[in-house]
């Protein structure tokens, strides 16, 4: 029981790191544009396929194609923002919601059409070992996914807090009118924030590709978890999202020790409902920049 | 009625901002009706009027947040009315919005630094900071504090300081006295005069009619989106309509 719990805690934390990267992208987009990006999961799926195909067709190592999937999704995000999101920014919320949901459906069905629903796996041969330490199994791809995810999350945090462009992004999210008054090009900041959010989730897709089954609907489960994380952390709070992601990862994984693994998703929804009932502003207050 | 003449040629050469028969509004709701006004370089001009007269809409239109449906706006001969807001700031027209609109979860210093976000202003950031801290010593004391924790008066100072960081040729102030205690209002108005002496042309929109006209060189009275009176500030202060409608005399 002891090592089982230890194993659960470890894998929970490792998953949590990836959830953090997915969630900060979501929270960045929400904080700056005020849009809930339902296409986030589909974009993550694209990130996974980018690395999968680069590996299968050209033998590119997924840790190298990480750059391709992050940059590719950044570009796609900027394009989506410019072409589709900008026109609905002033529209009622449910229209925005339908739009991002629509983007998700199109992307998923496009993947279905192009790449079939067959589940695929990407195995990195040199990482195909699992050392046991103190009765706990360590999976190298998962450790790498965790490490790189947390590093990217911290990097994004530093970017937002230390650079002029980062501060401009936060300024737009805190006070749009003030940002206009100081001459910040809001349209450009919107596109940039959306692009960065997509790059984060694309990178997350690549990072989990070596140990996840890839299919056109794979993003869904991550994005639902990410929604819970974003709400739990306080909408628009990056630091909150990081902590909440680790918490959710832990809760989900530890719960699976005690209840049938197939039911572990329930834990996420229970947390979600509890947060909404007891602390709707999230653990870390309303939207910290 | 006081009506301006077109003025001698030497005066017109120093024309900084010209708003010519501008109409603007929100959707089907027209707020401004053929509004014309001008500012000479170095002037303080006050636009006074009641709540809902269109004062804020006027400043938002000049700042490029609203596109005029008719008329034109020019800064030293350059047309502004089709430019996006950030290009207008770049041109040197900077607005202190109504209600301050500072960035509450950034520090005072970060707010000021973002004021100098555009490249030309960024190059002068250090000198601009010294200038602003000279005008508002209290902002220097509180520079590490989150802007949201400042008092109302300090937030107004920060909003003005942030605008100055952009090195404006024309500073537009939207109700700087809003919600401030009388003593603070006087302090802010004194600082606005200092800023003007440092060479910044000022367009001031105010409900505090008496203070505004005491400070300004010239003024315009805006009613229901139309300019109904204009002239030298002293003349407006002595005007019967202004006295009864705005000064309660």
Image (cartoon, rainbow, N blue to C red):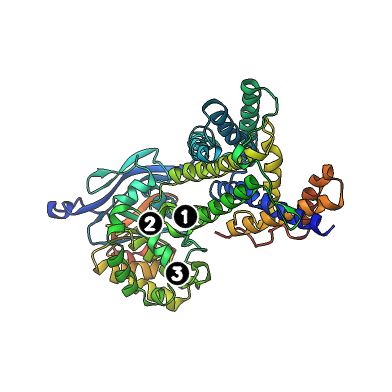
Q: Nearer the viewer, mark 2 or mark 3?
A: 2
The chain that hosts pointer 3 is B
Q: Is residue B224 visible?
A: yes
Q: Residues within 10 Å of mark 1 (few under 14, many from 20)?
A: some
> How far from the left and from the top, in percent, is residue B97?
43, 58
Q: Which residue is mark 3?
A: B248
The residues tagged by marks 1 and 2 sit, at their Cα atoms, a distance apart of 28 Å
> How far from the left and from the top, in percent, is residue B89?
34, 51
Residue B190, by quadrant, is bottom left
A88 is higher (above) or lower (below) than A228: above
Q: Which dot marks residue A159?
A: 1
Residue at point 40% right, 59% down? B114
Q: Residues within 10 Å of mark 2 (few under 14, many from 20)?
A: many
Query: Which residue is nearer to you in this view: A214 or B212?
Result: A214
Task: Name, please, the residue furthest toward the right.
Answer: A259
Q: Residues within 10 Å of mark 3 (few under 14, many from 20)?
A: few
> How far from the left and from the top, in percent, is residue B228?
36, 53
Q: Which dot marks residue B95?
A: 2
The residues tagged by marks 1 and 3 sit, at their Cα atoms, a distance apart of 54 Å
The chain that hosts pointer 2 is B
Query: Which residue is nearer to you in this view: A127 or B246?
Result: A127
Residue at point 54% right, 56% down? A154
Ranked by sequence position, the earlier of labels 2 and 3 is 2
Secondary structure at badge 3 equals loop
Q: Is residue A287 left or right of residue B75?
A: right
């Amino acid at each position: 029981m002891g090592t089982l719990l230890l194993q659960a805690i470890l894998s929970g934390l490792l998953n949590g790191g990836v959830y953090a990267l997915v969630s900060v992208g979501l929270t960045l987009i929400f904080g700056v544009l005020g849009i809930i990006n339902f296409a986030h999961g589909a974009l993550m799926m694209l990130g996974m396929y980018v690395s999968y195909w680069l590996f299968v067709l050209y033998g590119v190592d997924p840790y190298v194609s990480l750059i391709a999937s992050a940059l590719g999704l950044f570009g796609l995000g900027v394009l989506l923002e410019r072409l589709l999101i900008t026109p609905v920014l002033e529209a009622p919320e449910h229209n925005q919601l339908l739009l991002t949901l629509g983007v998700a459906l199109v992307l998923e069905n496009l993947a279905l059409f192009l790449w079939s629903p067959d589940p695929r796996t990407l195995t990195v041969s040199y990482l195909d070992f699992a050392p046991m330490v103190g009765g706990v199994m360590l999976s190298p791809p998962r450790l790498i996914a965790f490490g790189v995810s947390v590093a990217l999350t911290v990097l994004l945090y530093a970017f937002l807090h230390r650079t002029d462009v980062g501060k401009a992004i936060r300024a737009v999210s805190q006070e749009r009118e003030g940002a206009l008054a100081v001459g910040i090009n809001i349209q450009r900041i919107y596109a940039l924030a959306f692009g960065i959010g997509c790059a984060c989730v694309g990178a997350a897709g690549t990072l989990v590709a070596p140990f996840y089954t890839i299919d056109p609907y794979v993003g869904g489960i991550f994005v639902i978890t990410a929604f819970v994380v974003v709400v739990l952390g306080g909408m628009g709070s990056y630091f909150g999202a990081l902590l909440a992601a680790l918490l959710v990862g832990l809760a989900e994984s530890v719960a699976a020790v005690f209840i049938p693994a197939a039911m572990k998703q329930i834990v996420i929804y229970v947390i979600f409902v509890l947060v909404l009932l007891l602390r709707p502003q999230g653990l870390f207050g309303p939207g910290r920049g | 009625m006081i009506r301006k003449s077109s003025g001698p040629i030497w005066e017109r050469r120093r024309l900084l901002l010209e708003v010519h028969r501008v109409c603007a509004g929100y959707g089907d709701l027209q707020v401004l009706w053929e509004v014309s006004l001008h500012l000479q370089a170095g002037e303080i001009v006050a636009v006074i009027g009641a709540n809902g007269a269109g004062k804020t809409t006027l400043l938002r239109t000049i700042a490029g947040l609203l596109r005029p449906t008719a008329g034109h706006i020019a800064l030293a001969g350059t047309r502004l009315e089709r430019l996006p807001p950030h290009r207008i700031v770049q041109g040197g027209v900077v607005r202190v919005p109504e209600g301050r609109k500072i960035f509450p979860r950034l520090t005072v210093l970060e707010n000021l630094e973002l004021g100098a976000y555009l490249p030309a202003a960024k190059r002068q950031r250090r000198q601009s900071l010294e200038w602003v801290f000279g005008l508002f010593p209290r902002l220097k004391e509180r520079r590490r504090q989150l802007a949201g924790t400042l008092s109302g008066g300090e937030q107004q100072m920060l909003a003005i300081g942030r605008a100055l960081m952009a090195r404006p040729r024309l500073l537009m102030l939207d109700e700087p006295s809003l919600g401030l205690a009388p003593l603070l209002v006087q302090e802010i108005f004194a600082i606005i005069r200092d800023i003007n002496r440092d060479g910044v042309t000022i367009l001031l929109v105010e409900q505090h009619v008496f203070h505004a006209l005491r400070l300004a060189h010239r003024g315009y009275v805006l009613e229901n989106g139309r300019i109904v009176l204009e002239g030298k500030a002293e003349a407006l202060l002595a005007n019967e309509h202004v006295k009864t409608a705005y000064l309660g005399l």
